[in-house]
Image (cartoon, helix red, strand yellow):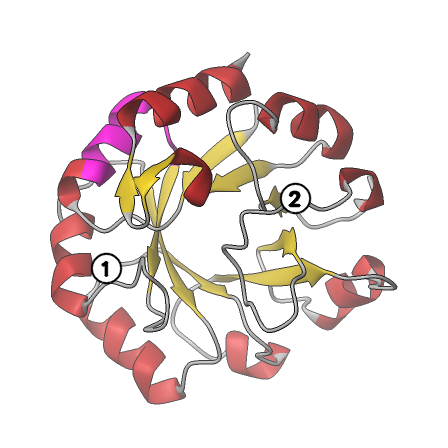
Amino acid sequence: MTLIKICGITTREDAKMACDSGANAIGLVFYPPSPRHVSIEQAQDVVNSLPPFTMSVGLFVNATREEVEQVIEQVAIDIIQFHGDEPEAFCASFARPYIKAVRMKEGLDLHALEKEFTSARGLLLDTYKKGVPGGTGETFNWDKVPHDLNKPIILAGGLVAGNVAQAIKIANPYAVDVSGGVEASKGKKDPQKIIQFVGNVRE
């Protein structure tokens, strides 16, 4: 079964909607330039409202050690998602497991990256767009995802209800990650889009 993470959650209402629809994990963005950025107080409110067995993921982009520590000391997130140019030693140095996001540009060697980030729980594959760390709303070529990687693959980048079934069929990921594809506006989720997305993944 392909697991589902709904990222860019900003309110407990959207978190409840995601969980009620069948999401396995929710993502909180701790990256100030993002329109989906949350404060520590907002994140606490969301995480404290989650039902059991729903994972909370904290997303960082080239944050300082102090910024990451401040969040994980005050918010009970389960796993960190590093979405910038963080080296393996930095990613592995916190009291939480992590996943490493990779932007799929031409010539990228995922087998080499997998060996470089041996401590990562999984690799999240997102669309490469110059100067944009994620949330591009654009897909990449799913045929480029090798099927012989040892680490779980989380597929992201431009996923919507209308293309997620095809993406799963081609890339065969462990999980899919959606943010903009289930929004009414940036940072605000659309209940119908979430229900359709989850339904299409489950089918």
- For the residue marked with disc 1, what is the amino acid? Ala
Per the image, label 2 sits on a secondary structure element best described as loop
Image height check: is 3 above or below 30?
Answer: above
Extreme residue toward the top, this view? 203
Foreground residue among 96 and 170: 170
Q: Is residue 190 above or below residue 77?
A: above
> Which residue lies most toward the right here?
107
Q: Mark 1, residues whose alpha carbon is within 10 Å: few (<14), some, or many (≥20)?
A: some
- Tell me residue 106's x, y (percent): 84, 61
Q: Which mark is residue 76?
A: 1
Q: Position of residue 78 (x, y in %)?
A: 35, 55
Q: State the image coordinates of residue 21 (x, y, percent, origin top left).
A: 31, 22
Which residues make up the magenta segment? 14-24
Confirm whether the magenta stretch covers residue 22. yes
Quarter holding the N terminus is: top right
Name, please, the residue furthest toward the front.
185
* Magenta run includes residue 153: no
Kindly report the secondary structure that dominates the magenta region of the rendered protein. helix
Q: Residue at x 23, y 29 (%)?
A: 17
Relative horizontal placement of residue 41, taking residue 34 as reference (left or right):
left
The disc at residue 139 is: 2
Q: Residue at x 49, y 55 (%)?
A: 135
Residue located at (43% from left, 44% from top): 180
Q: For residue 167, which quarter of the picture?
A: top right
**Which kind of residue does numbered mark 2 sit on?**
Thr
Residue 189 visible in the picture: yes
